[in-house]
Image (spheres, rainbow, N blue to C red):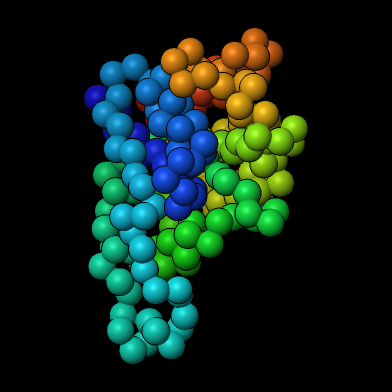
């Protein structure tokens, strides 16, 4: 059975990105899904001084362990001022101190959505460019614009063109796990 870790890279309790990450993971039949909430991994803001004085927080090790146990990782990025959320960036900073290979060389599917016409594509490009560095896998990415219009929690992606693009990327992601 395939093990998937999925999360919305946001601390919002009503995150549309968490909804998209969850929906995406559920589309992989016969998968065990571990849906993470970044709020469960709150840590001090990363600094070298804090790390020298107190070490790496236990929450960083716990988060990293979830990644290690997964066969594939799904992340859906919220865009704050054109970049990652502070919650995601802080976790990313801390787990990068544990091991050089941050995402454990796992197959990944990077997503982003917003209620705007661009679908948080800017943060998706930033995330892809950073996360794909050194990762031997072909990382899939998909942006869903106009979340309120194009997504329904029961039926998923309503726009046929976007849904076909999504399903093609999901197929490639799933096959990269199985290979």
Please tell me which residue is depicted at 40% across the width and 63% down the height of the picture. 95
> On the picture, is 109 further left or further right than 39?
right
Between 21 and 128, the one lying in front of the other is 21
- Number of marks present in the image shown: 0
Please tell me which residue is depicted at 71% across the width and 36% down the height of the picture. 116
Name the quarter where the N terminus is drawn: top left
Image quadrant in which you'd find residue 141:
top right
Q: Find residue 134 and report its horizontal and vertical position in percent.
A: 55, 53
Please tell me which residue is depicted at 68% across the width and 30% down the height of the picture. 145
Please tell me which residue is depicted at 59% across the width and 38% down the height of the picture. 112
On screen, residue 104 above or below 110: below
Name the quarter where the C terminus is drawn: top left
Q: Find residue 17 and report its horizontal and vertical position in percent.
A: 51, 38
Q: Is residue 67 visible?
A: yes
Between 99 and 4, the one lying in front of the other is 4
Q: Find residue 56 and report its horizontal and vertical position in percent.
A: 32, 74
């Amino acid at each position: 059975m395939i093990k998937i870790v999925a999360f919305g890279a946001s601390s919002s309790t009503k995150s549309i990105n968490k909804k998209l990450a969850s929906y995406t993971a559920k589309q992989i039949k016969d998968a065990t899904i571990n849906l993470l909430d970044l709020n469960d991994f709150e840590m001090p803001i990363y600094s070298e001084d804090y790390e020298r004085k107190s070490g790496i927080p236990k929450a960083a090790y716990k988060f990293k362990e979830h990644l290690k146990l997964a066969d594939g990782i799904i992340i859906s990025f919220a865009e704050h001022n054109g970049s990652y959320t502070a919650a995601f960036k802080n976790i990313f900073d801390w787990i990068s101190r544990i091991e050089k290979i941050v995402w454990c060389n796992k197959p990944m599917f990077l997503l982003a959505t917003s209620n705007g016409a661009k679908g948080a594509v800017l943060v998706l490009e930033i995330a892809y460019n950073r996360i794909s560095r050194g990762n031997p896998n072909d990382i899939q990415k998909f942006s869903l614009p106009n979340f309120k219009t194009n997504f329904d929690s029961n039926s998923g992606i309503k726009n046929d063109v976007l849904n076909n693009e999504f399903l093609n990327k999901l197929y490639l992601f799933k096959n990269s796990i199985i290979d």
